[in-house]
Amino acid sequence: MVKVSVSDKRNPVPQTIQFNENLKITTWGAIKVNKSDFFPSSFQIVSEGKTIYIDPVETSTSEKADYIFITHAHPDHYSVKTIERIVKPETIFICSKEVSKKLSRKGYTIRTVVPDSSIEADGINSEAVHAYNTKNVFLWIKAHPKSKQNVGYILTLGDDIRIYHAGDTDYIPEMEKIKDIDIVMVPIGGDNLTMNIDEASKMVNKIKPKQVIPMHYELKNKADLTKFKSLVDQDITVTIFE
């Protein structure tokens, strides 16, 4: 069983980037997954007065959500405890099929997505994209099989800023058609769970965003962050949260 909690190595101050005057991205830093200090795929995006969370886990805020996007049901991405702290009656959930099943009995407003579907509301366009493993964790078993229909998200927000949150995935063929992205949030942890730093940097250099935020990695692997930054094209800003 996977246990998730706040890491004692967490930065006590929430970390924020202001992409422009209408777009702010915040993360709360390290969590502990079992015994490993880990930087998760959890972000808050504030745009045009709307508060959006992607995979909120162990956030240190009670700021209420207008939208909560969840990529899949693993506990480092889907946390009932965190959701209950940030949800309000008007919150809209956009979720993969497996997460929607788990949330449906709680009476929330849920919109279920599958890869290649899209939803538009309040000036936010969200596209669900494929997120799956090509590598096996053990024999024929994959951590994130394509059959689960887990997703990543491309969000088009105010000023036509496009953010791609890849979810947990390898570098897959469907990524070849993703374009016109301003900010990429990409997993780099490897271990047959996601892309490693080589695959992630190749994907980023292919998509060519303005900015990339690495996520889903163990904090002890600081050298991997340095290497990832060195592999990304120099005209792409690499923002590393800790």
Image (spheres, rainbow, N blue to C red):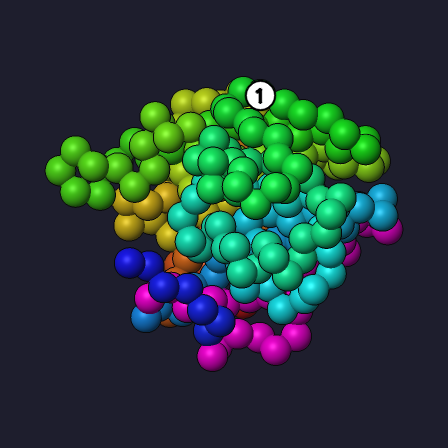
Range covered by the magenta-colored residues = 8-34
* Residue 21 magenta-highlighted: yes
Residue drawn where x is 60% and y is 64% of the image: 59
Residue drawn where x is 42% and y is 28% of the image: 149
Instruction: Give x and y (percent) for residue 145.
Output: 32, 32
Residue drawn where x is 48% and y is 50% of the image: 77
Vertical placement of 120 versus 29: above or below? above
Q: Amino acid at mark 1?
A: Ser
The quadrant of the picture occupied by the N terminus is bottom left
Instruction: Give x and y (percent) for residue 114.
Output: 51, 25
Vertical placement of 180 versus 81: above or below? above
Residue that carries the numbered disc 1 in the rendered image: 117
Instruction: Give x and y (percent) for residue 242.
Output: 54, 67
Q: Is residue 121 visible?
A: yes
Residue 151 or 224: which is nearer the viewer? 151
Residue drawn where x is 72% and y is 52% of the image: 88
Number of dots carrying numbers: 1
Q: Mark 1 packing: few (<14 Cα in 10 Å), some, or many (20+)?
A: few
